[in-house]
Amino acid sequence: MNEYSLTYEEALNILKKAGCSESVIEHCIAVSKTAVEIAESCLRKGKKLDLNVIKIGALLHDIGRAFTHDVKHGVMGAALAKAMSLPTSTIRIIETHIGAGIPAEEAEEIGLPKKDYIPLTIEEKIVCYADKLTKGNIRVDFSQAIKELAETLGRSHPALTRLNLLKEDILSSCSEI
């Protein structure tokens, strides 16, 4: 199965069959919509990216929430996606959307396998960023996203810096949305 053979409807069915709740599915739909808006902005500025990878990857990014709602949902979701033979680009989006990307040392400290969970491609970065701009199925502005992350992790947590860098990286390629 590759990115081009997986339709939006098929991805929605994958979330349902995995056992994701209706609220998780609504969140995934909202993240996909935001990610597509960001990606379209990038395309208008001449950035090369794969819009379908973003749309489907964003829709499936929280598939691991069928099993857990803690940070391990990224790893568990990626394992499920791999077992389903989903495309590597989708697996990477699922695995790297957690936090604002998590480096290996920090991952090990919080109980994840020691490896980098940092979004690298523009597609991975856009989905990670769109996820942080989506609370439930509601779009929030960046200042609200930063505030909530600080309240959850603490004001000096390195994830705040990573989220700011993620925003700067996307905005350097794309216009503000």
Image (tube, rainbow, N blue to C red):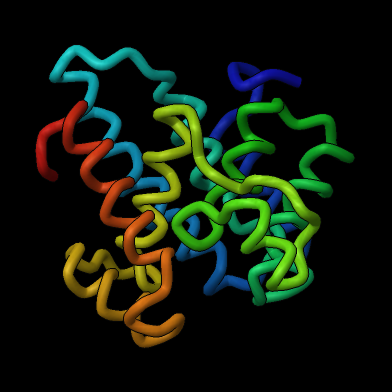
Q: Is residue 8 left or right of residue 174?
A: right
Q: Quadrant of residue 111?
A: bottom right
Q: Residue furthest left?
A: 176
Residue at (36, 77) in percent of width and height: 156
> Where is 79 relative to 143, above or below?
above
Image quadrant of residue 123?
A: top left
The answer to which image quadrant residue 93 occupies is: top right
The quarter of the image holding the N terminus is top right
Q: Is residue 49 left or right of residue 8?
A: left
**Residue sitting nearer the eye, 155 or 95:** 155
Foreground residue among 43 and 70? 70
Give above or below for 50 relative to 129: above
Residue occupying the point 26% across, 37% down: 170
Residue 163, image x, y percentages: 34, 56
Q: Residue at image x 56%, y 55%?
A: 102
User: Picture coordinates of residue 140 (x, y %)?
Assistant: 23, 68
- Does residue 87 appear to the left or right of 118 in the view shown? right
Q: Disc count in the image? A: 0
Above or below — where is 4 with respect to 169? Answer: above
Q: Is residue 115 left or right of residue 120?
A: right
Image spot of residue 73 (x, y percent): 69, 64
The image shows residue 89, relative to residue 10, as above or below, that is above
Extreme-right residue of the structure? 83
For the C terminus, give its image quadrant. Answer: top left
Where is residue 124? Give x, y as percent. 48, 37
Identified at 20% across, 26% down, the residue is: 173
